[in-house]
Amino acid sequence: MNQVTHKARILIAKPGLDGHDRGAKYVAHILRDAGFEVIYTGIRRSPEQIVAAAVQEDVAAIGLSVLSGAHIELFGRVLELLKGRGASDIAVFGGGTIPPADVPRLEAMGVAAVFTPGSSAASIIEKLDKITAVGA
């Protein structure tokens, strides 16, 4: 008998003033198609709005898409707000036009994964499976 597995709830958000959300929608679709429950907040959300929605929706992870160059500040603020809300157990991952040289800094801040342009759907799904697995 096949066992049905339920995957985690993930919030996808576009923080800051970016108006281009093609990548965020792409990631939301591939995660949904892979069995995750996905909540997409839309564009131009503040870190405060994103964290409030994540806590309210009881998500396992937040995916941030940043194209503006403000990724260090925006990811840092989301992580800080999660800590302040006692929700540091919510994993944060992201992507966008993030220079490869900034990836180690984001990871050192506590970002669970960074997907740069060209990341395959399979690699994103595989990493999110690991990040959101029970006991991860």
Image: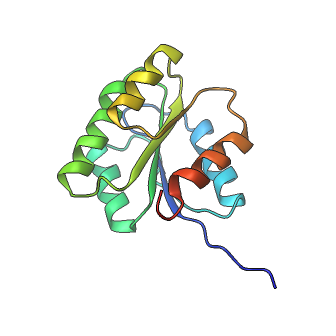
Residue 21: tell me if it is visible. yes
Q: Where does residue 76 sit, x and y in percent of width and height? A: 29, 34
* Residue at the image point whose x is 48% and y is 33% from the top: 19
Q: What percent of the width, then of the height, locates residue 7? A: 60, 66
Q: Does residue 8 lie above or below 49 as drawn?
A: below
Residue situated furthest left in the rendering: 84
Furthest-right residue in view? 1
Residue at left offset 61%, top offset 62%: 36
Pick the quarter of the image with the N terminus.
bottom right
Position of residue 22 in the picture relative to residue 69 (left or right): right
Choose top left, top right, bottom left or bottom right for residue 52.
Answer: bottom left
- Horizontally, residue 16 falls left or right of residue 11, namely left
The answer to whether residue 92 is above or below residue 96 is below
- Seen at 47% across and 41% down, the residue is 93
Residue 120 percent across, percent down from the top left: 72, 36
- Could you tell me which residue is drawn at 65 percent across and 59 percent down? 32
Colour mode of the rendering:
rainbow
User: Is residue 71 something that shows in the picture?
Assistant: no
Q: Quadrant of residue 133?
A: bottom right
Q: In the shown orientation, is residue 76 left or right of residue 38?
A: left
Q: Nearer the viewer, residue 93 or 12?
A: 93
Q: Quadrant of residue 61?
A: bottom left
Q: How many marks?
A: 0
Outermost residue on the bottom side: it is 1
